[in-house]
């Protein structure tokens, strides 16, 4: 019997981290392959590029590209050759084409298995040797998920763990969802995720600044390593395999972190299967974009695979007054020298020569009118000879994993990030009394960040009696050097309907001009304990953080050292029917800069969360439901009393409920639904008047619904229709002086597989998306007594032609 364990993933538990999944097989049970498997495999198309030659080699390549394990008797293929296979087919159709002329055929069994047999002897001949069995692909915590329902995550434990075994709330946005909803940024990709305010700066998509559970600017990680700053650095979603949100304090895994949660972006990496995709898009605001995703085997005999993902775009801003341009490329190479070792080296380069602006308006003119009425949604206060934003991002890193034996696996993940941004823009500084004139500022900022992050891990899998352990120990380190400069010049007051658009050379004031050098070292230990259906997660971490702020204007340096112990504990029980109740406790910390009135350095800001809920994830993998309640408290916040003295007594408490559904109701119908209710308030402050105030920008209620239906056969074969609705409730500004009204937005999509018209168009798909379908005008958020407000984006329509071969 010859066993061709095709692809690195099928060869070992190590490489299983890279095994990918198809949408239909993701719906089947992980146990024996049954009728549901046959149905889902029949519904899934795969792109093949199998060269001609020996049948045995062709089957090897076929299985690798389909990411399937093939078991067959060597005598059955000996001496046989094939002409090859190129195109996108159902697995059954592809196998029929591949075997043409060999004298062999295949037959689907009732249990979903596939038997390859010699047509001369027949499938039921008693002399027939063992069949070829095609088994389902196993989803990886870092690999692709075809469809919307992910079953595994790496963000919750830093290990390849099923979501239903993690006692904490996690949301996963897959690449298919990003594609179907035509998301242009990570923030847009999370529009249908509960408890997240994704676009509080409205039409500006300059940064992915997200609020979670009432807390602002949750940090972003890329492949488990910290990336950029909350308002510095952005990655195009076309480069991503998935976006994960781990809610609540997460310092035990990631060190100093916002208590709202952590957003982890998983990049597209080599999978061992051949993929060739090109897409071209046009849309409103003169959008033109092109993207490409090419992957495959580089050196089969050396175990080397590759992948290159690239994206370029140009579009207008502010009614054509300004432009936004981008070019991005992310190459990666994986090397599997043996079944125990894998090395992935990846890089990315993204240049935004015109990166977009982030201006704001005022409450008067957005929430309520001026004597001239309301500001237009595309109002621009800028100057042609001044406004400019250029941003360049580069990263280089690697992931190395080695299985020492069946018990011990070692990993090292490292990355270097370099982000440079220069932003010049004239902004509305304030609206003057009477509402007909505005004051404008010419502002200039330079931000440069150099960042090095490394995470060393050792994973131990062993049993003690009936207890299974997955112990993870790690040591991570982050170093970064951040240089920032900010200056401005007041241009005075002008009628906002007749602004001066050329300002000439201006003498900028010397504002912020400093360099911050910081580092963090963390030592952590985690044990995932499994006793039958009971899963317990315990973790502890100790961090040492240092920073030195060098202020160039005063030639002074402020140094600070902090350390903190954080932890987590959680338990979840998986019942046979798919219901899994869970409860967890977790903590986090963030350094607090400055000193008190006695000159003592402030303690770190701390947070803790109690969370409980129910997950529903039946074994067929078609549905994932999470319902959770939580209480999240942040303490040691630095506040100012009435005499402007700093006092570290501030406290914010958030309580809420979240509900999320991701479902493949049928192979044709996919549904996403969510609801969240959040009540986050200031519970202690140096100023008594602030106690009881709601936190800014976070709506009390949010709800979303999205569905997609793909026709299979009949008159509408190849057609898919989808649509969604997003409700965002009332929010307030930072001093609770104004309320931002609620709003409801509608989205729609339509796609057509052109291969349904003719095989000449196999692999071609046309997709049309409309976000904010009815072009509603609304205010996304306001802050500081409506001193600054942002309109939300208007209707955007995008048409995309995609070709896979």
Image (cartoon, rainbow, N blue to C red):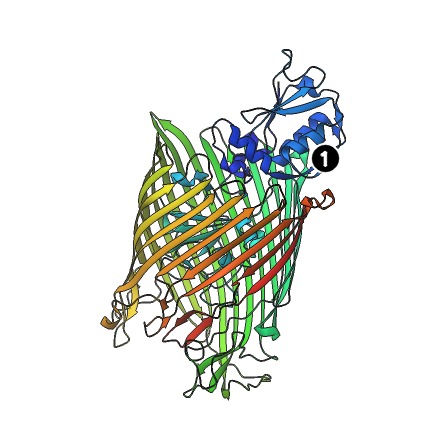
Residue under numbered circle 1: 85
Residue 396 visible at all: no
Rate crowding at label 1 as few (under 14), some (14 to 19) or many (20 or more) other CA atoms within 10 Å.
many
**Disc 1, SS:** strand
Residue 536 sits in quarter:
top left
Q: Residue at x 43, y 51 (%)?
A: 673
- The location of residue 205, given as percent across then percent down, is 52, 65
Question: Which of 630 and 672 lies nearest the eye of the viewer?
Answer: 672
Instruction: Name the side, left or right, on which 672 lies relative to 611.
Output: right
Instruction: Name the side, left or right, on which 269 lies relative to 299.
Output: left
The quarter in which the N terminus is drawn is top right
Q: Residue at x 65, y 13 (%)?
A: 125
Residue 688 sits in quarter:
bottom left
Q: Residue at x 69, y 29 (%)?
A: 96
Residue farthest to the left, as pictured: 688
Residue farthest to the front, as pictured: 715
Question: Which of 199 and 747 lies nearest the eye of the viewer?
Answer: 747
- The location of residue 252, given as percent across then percent down, is 37, 47
> From the viewer's perspective, is residue 751 above or below residue 140?
below
């Amino acid at each position: 019997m010859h066993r061709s364990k095709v692809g690195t993933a099928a060869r070992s538990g190590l490489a299983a981290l890279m095994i990918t999944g198809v949408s239909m097989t993701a719906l089947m049970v992980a146990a024996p392959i049954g009728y549901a498997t046959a149905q889902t495999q029949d519904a899934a198309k795969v792109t093949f590029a199998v060269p001609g030659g020996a049948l045995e080699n062709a089957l090897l390549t076929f299985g690798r590209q389909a990411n399937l394990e093939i078991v067959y008797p060597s005598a059955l293929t000996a001496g046989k050759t094939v002409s090859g296979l190129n195109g996108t087919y159902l697995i059954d159709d592809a196998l029929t084409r591949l075997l043409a002329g060999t004298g062999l055929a295949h037959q689907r069994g009732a249990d979903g298995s596939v038997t390859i047999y010699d047509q001369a002897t027949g499938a039921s001949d008693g002399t027939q040797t063992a069949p070829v069995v095609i088994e389902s692909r196993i989803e990886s915590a870092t690999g692709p998920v075809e469809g919307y329902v992910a079953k595994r995550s790496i963000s919750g434990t830093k290990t390849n763990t099923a979501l239903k075994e993690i006692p904490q709330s996690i949301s996963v946005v897959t690449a298919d969802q990003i594609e179907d909803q035509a998301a242009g940024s990570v923030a847009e990709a999370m529009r249908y995720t509960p408890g997240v305010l994704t676009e509080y700066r409205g039409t500006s998509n300059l940064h992915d600044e997200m609020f979670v559970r009432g807390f602002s600017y949750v940090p972003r990680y890329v492949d488990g390593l910290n990336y950029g700053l909350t308002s510095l650095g952005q990655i195009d979603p076309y480069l991503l395999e998935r976006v994960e949100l781990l809610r609540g304090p997460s310092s035990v895994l990631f060190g100093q972190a916002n208590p709202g949660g952590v957003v982890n972006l998983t990049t597209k990496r080599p999978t061992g299967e051949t993929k060739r995709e090109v897409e071209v898009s046009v849309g409103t605001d003169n959008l033109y974009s092109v993207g490409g995703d090419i992957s495959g085997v580089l050196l089969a005999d050396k175990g080397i695979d590759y992948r290159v993902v690239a994206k370029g775009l140009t579009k207008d801003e502010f009614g054509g007054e300004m432009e936004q341009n981008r070019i991005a490329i992310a190459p990666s190479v994986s090397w599997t020298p043996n079944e125990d070792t894998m090395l992935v080296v990846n890089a990315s380069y993204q240049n935004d020569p015109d990166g977009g602006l982030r201006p704001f308006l005022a409450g008067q003119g957005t929430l309520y009118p001026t004597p001239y009425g309301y500001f237009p949604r595309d109002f621009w206060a800028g100057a042609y000879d001044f406004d400019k934003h250029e941003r360049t991002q580069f990263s280089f890193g690697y992931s190395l994993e080695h299985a020492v034996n069946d018990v011990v696996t070692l990993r090292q993940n490292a990355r270097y990030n370099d982000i440079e941004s220069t932003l010049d823009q004239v902004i509305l500084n304030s609206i003057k009394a009477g509402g007909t004139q505005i004051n404008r500022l010419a502002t200039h900022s330079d931000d440069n960040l150099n960042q090095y992050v490394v995470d060393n891990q050792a994973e131990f899998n062993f049993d003690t009696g009936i207890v299974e352990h997955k112990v993870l120990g790690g040591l991570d380190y982050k170093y970064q050097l951040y240089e920032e400069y900010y200056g401005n010049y007041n241009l005075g007051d002008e009628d906002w309907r007749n602004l001066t658009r050329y300002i000439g050379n201006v003498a900028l004031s010397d504002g912020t001009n400093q360099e911050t050098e910081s580092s963090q070292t963390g030592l952590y230990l985690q044990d995932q304990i499994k006793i039958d259906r009971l899963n317990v997660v315990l973790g502890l971490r100790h961090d040492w953080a240092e920073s030195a702020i060098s202020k160039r204007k005063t030639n002074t340096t402020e140094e600070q050292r902090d350390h903190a112990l954080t932890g987590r504990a959680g338990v979840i029980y998986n019942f046979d029917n798919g219901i899994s109740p869970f409860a967890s406790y977790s903590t986090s910390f963030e350094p607090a800069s400055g000193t008190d009135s006695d000159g003592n350095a402030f303690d770190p800001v701390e947070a803790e969360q109690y969370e409980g809920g129910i997950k529903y994830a039946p074994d067929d993998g078609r549905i994932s439901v999470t319902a959770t309640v939580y209480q999240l408290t942040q303490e040691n916040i630095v506040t100012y009393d009435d005499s402007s003295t700093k006092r570290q007594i501030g406290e914010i408490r958030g309580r809420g409920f979240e509900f999320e559904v991701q479902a493949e109701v049928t192979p044709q119908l996919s549904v996403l639904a969510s609801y969240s209710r959040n009540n986050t308030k200031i519970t202690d402050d140096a100023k008594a008047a602030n106690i009881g105030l709601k936190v800014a920008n976070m709506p009390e209620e949010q709800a979303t619904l999205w569905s997609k239906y793909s026709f299979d056969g009949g008159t509408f074969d190849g057609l898919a229709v989808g649509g969604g609705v997003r409700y965002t409730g009332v929010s307030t500004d930072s001093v609770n002086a104004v309320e931002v009204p609620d709003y409801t937005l509608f989205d729609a999509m339509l796609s057509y597989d052109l291969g349904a018209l003719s095989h000449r168009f196999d692999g071609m798909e046309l997709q049309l998306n409309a976000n904010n379908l009815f072009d509603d005008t609304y205010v996304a958020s306001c802050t500081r007594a409506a001193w600054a407000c942002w309109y939300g984006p208007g209707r955007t329509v995008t048409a995309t032609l995609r070709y896979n071969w």
